[in-house]
Image: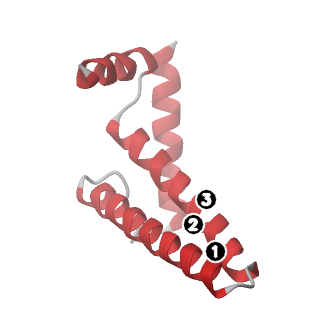
């Protein structure tokens, strides 16, 4: 049942696996930044241990999502930033034309 609902949501919102993965990367990055800030400002060893463990889990998940994105060729971290920006621009332009 959940896969049916997930597929219907993707159809209605025009989401692709690439978009979902990129949003997950961005969310994991934001969460890692928050945990790092909390870790750096916490004063008790217990809190530092909790934040550090959570940060390590987030980094592991982030790495897995990035690895998947590279494997699926949703992004290439080794090309020049200008070329990356050009590719994103072309995708956005194509999406905007498709929606009209």
The mark tally for this picture is 3
Q: Which mark is residue 30?
A: 3
Q: Residues within 10 Å of mark 1 (few under 14, many from 20)?
A: some
Asked which secondary structure carries label 2, the reply is: helix
Question: What percent of the width, then of the height, locates residue 10?
Answer: 37, 23
* Residue at (70% x, 72% y) in the render: 38
Of badges 3 and 1, nearer the viewer stands: 1
User: x, y percentage for residue 61?
Assistant: 38, 63
Q: Give the camera-side residue of 48 and 46.
A: 46
Q: Secondary structure at mark 3?
A: helix
Left or right side of 98 for 4: left
Residue nearest the viewer, comparing 13 with 86: 13
In the rendered image, the vertical position of residue 38 relative to residue 5, given as above or below: below
Q: Are marks 1 and 2 in contact (CB under 8 Å)?
A: yes
Please tell me whether residue 26 is drawn above or below residue 94 in the rendered image.
below
Disc 3: CA contacts within 10 A as few (<14), some (14-19) or many (>=20): few
Mark 1 element type = helix
Residue at numbered disc 2: 32
Residue 84: percent from the left, percent from the top? 48, 58
- Say the numbered circle drawn on residue 36: 1
Answer yes or no: do the residues labelled 2 and 3 have beta carbons within 8 Å? Answer: yes
Residue sitting at 41 percent across and 14 percent down? 12
| Residue 6 in the figure: left or right of residue 50 | left
């Amino acid at each position: 049942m959940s896969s049916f609902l997930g597929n219907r949501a993707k159809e209605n919102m025009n989401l692709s696996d690439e978009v979902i993965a990129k949003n997950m990367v961005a969310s994991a990055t934001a969460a890692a930044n928050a945990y790092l800030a909390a870790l750096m400002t916490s004063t008790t060893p217990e809190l530092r241990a909790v934040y550090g463990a959570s940060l390590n889990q987030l980094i592991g998940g982030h790495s897995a999502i990035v690895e998947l994105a590279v494997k699926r060729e949703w992004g290439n971290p080794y090309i020049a930033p200008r070329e990356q920006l050009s590719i994103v621009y072309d995708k956005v332009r194509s999406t905007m034309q498709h929606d009209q």
